């Protein structure tokens, strides 16, 4: 299985920006759909964004569309999440995940997939 390690979380004020990174090791992720999920305190984990293997196709939750951008560098075996115009409701632990499976526009972890350990993002007002 691939090992995923997130970094880049932290405390930011409303309207600020953060860039999360997800470094993969153990195997190449270049052929995989990869994504980001988040879990706020007391809530279920939810989908944030996904990207296909080439980076040409990206998908976003409605709540982050227009503010977040997912990207990847297959040469570095890394996936990124650029988060702009952050809101207090974006506060959560963010998890990198992959490979993902896609069905009818929804994304979930494939049987062979892995979760990262998570990185905390806190948006203060």
Image: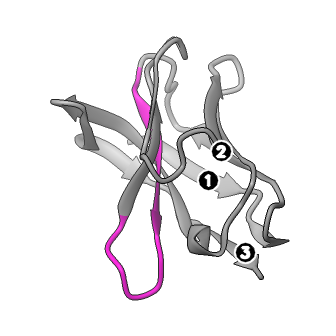
User: Quarter holding the N terminus?
Assistant: top left
Q: Vertically, is 9 above or below 83?
A: below
The numbered mark, 1 or 2, whose residue comes first in the sequence reads 1
Q: How is the image coloured?
A: one colour
Q: Nearer the viewer, mark 1 or mark 3?
A: 3
SS at mark 1 in the image: strand
The reply to whether dot 1 and dot 2 touch (C-beta < 8 Å) is no
- Check the image and name the residue furthest to the bottom: 42
Upstream in sequence: badge 1 or badge 3: 1
Cα distance, mark 2 to mark 3? 14 Å
Q: Position of residue 33 (x, y in %)?
A: 40, 27
For the record, the magenta segment spans: 32-45
- Cα–Cα span, label 1 and label 2: 23 Å
Q: Residue at x 72, y 57 (%)?
A: 7
Image quarter where the C terminus lies is bottom right
Q: Is residue 74 magenta?
A: no
Left or right position of 4 against 107? right
The residue located at (61%, 53%) in the rendering is 5
Q: N-terminal of the two: label 2 or label 3?
A: 2
The residue pinned by badge 2 equals 67
Q: Furthest-left residue in view?
A: 104
Residue at screen point 69% across, 17% down: 75
Q: What residue do we see at 62% from left, 19% from top?
A: 74
- Badge 3 is on which residue? 123
Q: Which mark is residue 5?
A: 1
């Amino acid at each position: 299985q691939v090992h995923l390690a997130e970094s880049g979380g932290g405390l930011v004020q409303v309207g600020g920006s953060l860039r999360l990174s997800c470094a993969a090791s153990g195997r190449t992720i270049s052929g995989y759909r990869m994504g980001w999920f988040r879990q706020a305190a007391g809530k279920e984990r939810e989908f944030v964004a996904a990207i296909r293997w080439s980076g040409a196709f990206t998908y976003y939750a409605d709540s982050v569309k227009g503010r977040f951008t997912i990207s990847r560098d297959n040469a570095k075996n890394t996936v990124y999440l650029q988060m702009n115009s952050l809101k207090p409701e974006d506060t959560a632990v963010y998890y990198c995940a992959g490979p993902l499976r896609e069905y009818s526009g929804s994304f979930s972890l494939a049987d062979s997939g892995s979760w990262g350990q998570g990185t905390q993002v806190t948006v203060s007002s």
